[in-house]
Amino acid sequence: MQGEAVQIEARKVWIARLLVAIVIFINLQAAVQYLLNPNAYSGAFELEGVPGMAAVMGVGILYVMWQVPYVFAAINPIAHRLSMTEAVLMQTIGLLGETWMRSRIPAEHAILRNSILRYIFFDAGGLVLLIIAWFLVKENVIAQKKAED
């Protein structure tokens, strides 16, 4: 029975890792696209030329930078529980910020509003995956903390 419980907990950890890895993959895929082909995306932000290219590339760099806690959470969501929590909080801030930002953009900027709406959808989906991952390892973290005390 105890061996079975250990297997279940190990499975939860691997599922959590997979969920975090999916979010990392999606975010890094966008980052690479922004870095390698920024001009293809600058129009969606109503930007053009060198300033548009630089702005989109800057977002790509930020995407890479923001993945640091996600990577640690994916490697070991129990040992790096703080990184796991940071990933959930970062994703939440992104979703709330994008939603607020979109609400401030006038309707006549439909292309820009739709671009931000895509961010909202992706970040909402990522947040759901991260919250599921967080809950999957929560009991393990509590048990580990009790064992340390």
Image (tube, rainbow, N blue to C red):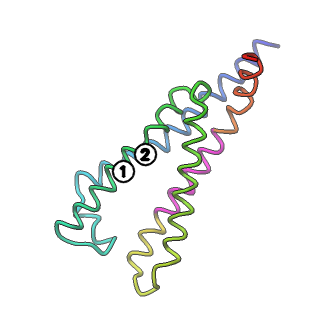
The quadrant holding residue 80 is top right
Query: Judging from the image, what secondary structure is the residue with disc 2 in?
Result: helix
Q: Is residue 58 left or right of residue 82?
A: left
- Mark number displayed over residue 136: none
**Most frequent secondary structure within the magenta stretch:** helix
Q: Quadrant of residue 86?
A: top right
Seen from the viewer's position, the closer of residues 88 and 14 is 88
Residue range corresponding to the magenta coloring = 119-133
Q: Is residue 128 magenta?
A: yes
Residue 71 shown left or right of residue 32 in the figure: right
Give the number of the disc on residue 66: 2
Quadrant of the snapshot with the N terminus = top right
Residue found 46% across the figure and 84% down from its top:
106
Along the viewing direction, whichever of 117 and 149 lies nearer the viewer: 149
The quadrant in which residue 65 appears is top left
List the residue tagged with mark 1: 62
Q: Residue at x 53, y 77 (%)?
A: 103
